[in-house]
Image: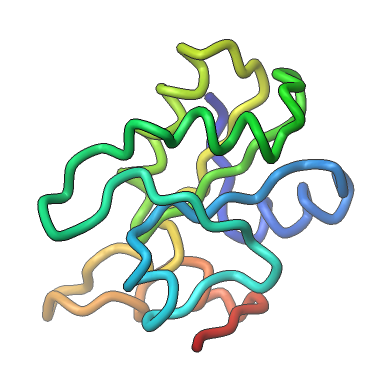
């Protein structure tokens, strides 16, 4: 799995229009915190029990058209869950998996807030929310 900064991700997606961009956060995070514009949503895990979604790989396969060498770029809140999700995709045979470093909201700052140090939103990249 390769790792890209948010700005590198935006550039990669621009040059690879067939790449899948997948937000693997929970549905509530995706809807209410916001998400990158144009991203697909497939939860890696979700509430109330936060169990791993047993259909994650299958859902991504459907989006990929069962083409395992299609690039898949994963983003989560801070770049951690997307690593686990990417490892699952690689174990299922995907060969071009990318993780967005720092995720959508970024790392915690000294006062335990996200969005002030790094991340997709911090970098001013396109995003939306419901």
Query: In the image, is residue 12 above or below residue 105?
Result: above
Whole-percent x and y of residue 1?
53, 24
The residue drawn where x is 32% and y is 72% is: 28
Residue 27 relative to residue 58: left or right: left
Of residues 27 and 71, the one nearer the viewer is 27
Q: Residue at (13%, 75%) from the top-left corner?
A: 112
Is 83 rendered above or below residue 30?
A: above
Residue 114, by quadrant, is: bottom left
- Vertical comparison of 64 with 109: above or below: above
Spot occupied by residue 9 in the image (x, y as percentages of width and height): 66, 52
Which of the pair 18/50 is nearer the observer? Answer: 50
**Percent position (x, y) of residue 33?**
38, 80
Q: How is the image coloured?
A: rainbow
- Total numbered labels: 0
Q: In the image, what residue occupies the spot 68% across and 52% down?
A: 8
Quadrant hosting residue 26: bottom left
In the depicted view, which residue is nearer to us: 94 or 7?
Answer: 94
Q: Quadrant of residue 39?
A: bottom right
Q: Residue furthest bottom?
A: 130
Vertical relation: 54 (above or below) 38:
above
| Residue drawn at 12 percent across, 80 percent down | 111
């Amino acid at each position: 799995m390769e790792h890209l900064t948010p700005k590198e991700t935006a550039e990669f997606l621009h040059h690879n229009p067939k790449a899948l961009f997948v937000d693997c956060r929970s549905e509530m995070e995706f809807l209410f915190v916001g998400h990158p514009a144009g991203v697909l949503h497939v939860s890696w895990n979700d509430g109330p029990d936060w169990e791993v979604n047993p259909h994650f790989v299958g859902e991504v396969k459907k989006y990929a058209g069962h083409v395992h060498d299609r690039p898949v770029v994963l983003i989560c809140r801070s770049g951690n869950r997307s690593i686990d999700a990417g490892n699952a995709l690689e174990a299922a045979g995907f060969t071009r998996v990318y993780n967005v470093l720092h995720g959508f909201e970024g790392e915690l700052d000294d006062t335990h807030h996200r969005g002030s140090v790094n991340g997709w939103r911090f970098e001013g990249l396109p995003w939306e929310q419901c």
